[in-house]
Every structure is written in structure tokens, then in C-alpha cells.
Amino acid sequence: MQVEITDGDILVDAVLLGELLDIEPAEVSKLMRAHAITGHCERGVDAHQGQYRLSFFYQNRRVRLSVDSSGHVLGRSIIEFGQQPLPRALHRSGE
């Protein structure tokens, strides 16, 4: 299981998220509780009905996962800004 969707709840495997954010999987939940990792979910409309875009932010990195309603990962992207902190504008949905 990498992404599990049940009754509107979405669970992303810490191994996958850790790999994408370049951190140890064991650190994922601790960093989420500390709000060092943040994220949001968008539901697809029209041609993307039944899909979700999950965005996660940590330090200088933004990770996006596109998944279908069964949790199958359709695509992923990573933007990393090297030594620069992630611009706040990239924390917005749809960009």
C-alpha cells in the first residue's frame, strides 16, 4: 500500500513520502505532528473526476502525487530549490 483511500480519508505510506521528501520514513509522522511537513489535497473535476492531487511541503521541497480513487499513483513530481527555502507561492493549490 502506497496510498490508501477509505471513506474520504487518505493515508500515504511513510516509506513513499520519506523517499519523495528525502527523509527517513521513521521521521515522517514526527515531522507532520510538528507541522514541519504540511500538505493539502485537491479533488479532480471534469476530466479528472475521481482523482486526487496530494501536495506535501518540507523545507525546500514540494512533492505532488496524483492518485485515482483506489489509491493507485498515476504520477508524481518533485520541485526542489536547493539551498533556497520553498517560495510561499508554491504552497498554493493549482500551481
Image (cartoon, rainbow, N blue to C red):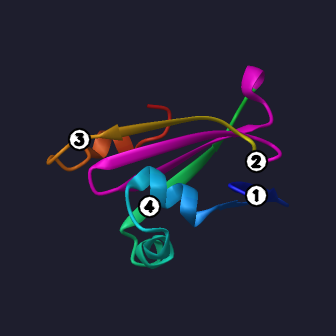
Residue at the disc numbered 1: 4
Q: Is residue 19 magenta?
A: no
Question: Would you place residue 21 above or below residue 73 in this image?
Answer: below
Q: How far apart are marks 1 and 2 (CA)?
A: 5 Å
Q: Provide the residue designation for mark 3.
A: 81
Count the numbered circles shown. Answer: 4
Dot 1 and dot 2 residues touching (CB under 8 Å): yes
**Camera-side residue: 83 or 9?**
83
Q: Distance between the residues labelled 2 and 3?
A: 28 Å
Q: Label 2: which residue? A: 71
Label 2: how many residues lie within 10 Å, few (<14), some (14-19) or many (20+)?
some
Q: What residue type is labelled 2?
A: Gly
Question: Residue type at mark 3?
Answer: Phe
Residue 33 image point, x, y percent: 46, 78
State which tag comes first along the sequence, 4 or 1: 1
Q: Quadrant of the N terminus?
A: bottom right
Please identify, in this view, whether the residue under mark 4 or under mark 3 is nearer the observer: 3
